[in-house]
Image (tube, helix red, strand yellow):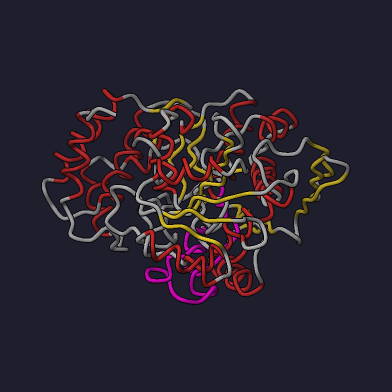
């Protein structure tokens, strides 16, 4: 991919703060004020936090709103193949010209003051959303919730918390309760709080925060339920029962994400057209995405133990076939936690260092972690070598371990458009 002007500006933005993560909101409030407070001029906001399923849930909500005839902005992170994926204006990816102009404006408004890359680019997205007409704004939390740069909207139309699990412990705390407390920081007084399936320790904290701030609870297992019956999705709440197609997004875990999306659409006053569209028209790349390549090749960017379990469940639900994995990970992630659920589903792991990532785990270290779990593993020098070796087996191929690896794979095969 050729270097674009927006890439140059984004590189300059990376140099504005010495840390990638620095969770305070002071810098965000300062820049938003300089931009005339776009967070106060957004179309109705649906704010989504959680450890797993945020992106899939957002994709289904967006598909539902679009199917019902509404235009929705969407902000997601990280991107896979290009930064533009993070910002959808009224349903369409931001153009290179619009992104370049937007980034220039925000860089100038910041005046060279310290601000993290995620903070300044989030402010840029909010400005773009405020300046472009639409019916809704979908905001995905970047990290945590309470101190995330997206947590600047005083009165969202709805807040959503998908399943909470252990991840980013170095920033959010090392217990489920601590992490849930950070996620629950997006809840607001009088605003619907749609809560997906949670472990007890997380749910306890979330319910305490709902009571503390006076949010309007809409909790899985209490106010709404979801499941499957005869290859259909069955959703039920106090309004009644819905019998819908299974979600287009693959994997048993997508049932709970689908339920959360339907619950959110219900709270927004949507009807049957939105529900059907949410199930049948949602796309979300690198989440058990089957690639358009010879053989059977699946790509998933999940990078924590819960994602490992979700991948294993999805593989189990596929027709039985020997499977090999290609795995690359960052050193901030739990390699053993991701690979352990996959032990019974894969026959061999080909490992690699993720190209261009300073925090990648060396291929040999991932191979050793896999070997310690009883898996056969081979460290390889690059992705093409790993892919050639995997293809030579004739087995199903799973590429996993990191969204950064997923982005490299999409670019490698010229499949960037599937990331949009």
Dividing the image into 4 quarters, which one contains the N terminus?
A: top left
**Quarter of image, res 26:** bottom left
Left or right: where 90 falls relative to 109: right
Residue 392: x %, y % from top left: 54, 41
Residue stretch rendered in magenta on the structure: 158-187
Which is nearer the eye, 112 or 346? 346
Left or right: where 154 falls relative to 212: left
Which is nearer the eye, 280 or 219? 280
* Residue positioned 52% across, 53% down in the render: 302
* Residue positioned 57% across, 64% down in the render: 375
* Residue positioned 65% across, 59% down in the render: 217
Which is nearer the eye, 211 or 13? 13
Q: Is residue 216 above or below residue 249?
A: below
Q: Is residue 96 above or below residue 338?
A: above
**Quarter of image, res 220:** bottom right
Which is nearer the eye, 308 or 146? 308
Residue 31: x %, y % from top left: 23, 48
Left or right: where 230 falls relative to 59: right
Residue 182 colored in magenta in the image: yes
């Amino acid at each position: 991919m050729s270097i674009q002007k927006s890439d140059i500006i984004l590189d300059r933005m990376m140099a504005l703060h010495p840390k990638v993560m620095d969770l305070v909101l002071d810098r965000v409030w300062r820049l938003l004020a300089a931009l005339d407070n776009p967070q106060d001029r957004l179309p109705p906001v649906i704010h989504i936090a959680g450890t797993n399923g945020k992106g899939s849930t957002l994709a289904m909500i967006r598909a539902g709103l679009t199917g019902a005839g509404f235009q929705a902005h969407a902000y997601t992170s990280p991107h896979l193949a290009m930064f533009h994926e993070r910002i959808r204006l009224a349903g369409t990816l931001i153009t290179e010209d619009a992104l370049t102009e937007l980034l220039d404006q925000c860089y100038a408004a910041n005046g060279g003051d310290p601000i993290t890359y995620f903070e300044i680019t989030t402010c840029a997205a909010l400005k773009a959303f405020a300046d472009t007409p639409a019916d809704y704004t979908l905001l995905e939390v970047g990290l945590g919730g309470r101190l995330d740069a997206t947590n600047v909207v005083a009165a969202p139309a709805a807040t959503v918390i998908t399943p909470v699990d252990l991840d980013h412990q170095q920033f959010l705390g090392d217990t489920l309760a601590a992490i849930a407390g950070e996620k629950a920081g997006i809840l607001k007084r009088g605003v619907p709080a749609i809560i997906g399936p949670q472990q007890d320790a997380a749910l306890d904290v979330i319910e305490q925060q709902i009571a503390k701030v006076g949010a309007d609870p809409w909790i899985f297992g209490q106010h709404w339920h979801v499941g499957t019956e005869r290859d259909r999705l069955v959703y039920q709440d106090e309004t009644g029962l819905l019998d819908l197609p299974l979600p287009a997004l693959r994997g048993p875990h997508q049932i709970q994400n689908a339920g959360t999306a339907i619950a959110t659409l219900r709270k927004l006053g949507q009807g049957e057209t939105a529900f059907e569209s949410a199930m049948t028209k949602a796309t979300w790349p690198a989440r058990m995405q089957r690639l358009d390549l010879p053989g059977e090749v699946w790509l998933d960017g999940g990078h924590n133990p819960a994602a490992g379990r979700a991948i294993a469940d999805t593989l189990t639900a596929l027709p039985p076939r020997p499977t090999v994995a290609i795995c690359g990970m960052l050193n901030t992630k739990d390699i053993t936690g991701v690979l352990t659920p996959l032990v019974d589903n894969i026959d061999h792991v080909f490992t690699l260092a993720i190209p261009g990532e300073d925090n990648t785990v060396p291929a040999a270290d991932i191979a050793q972690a896999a070997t310690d779990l009883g898996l056969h593993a081979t460290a390889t020098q690059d992705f093409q070598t790993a892919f050639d070796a995997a293809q030579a087996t004739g087995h199903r191929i799973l590429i996993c371990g990191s969204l950064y690896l997923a982005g490299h794979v999409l670019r490698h095969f010229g499949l960037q458009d599937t990331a949009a």
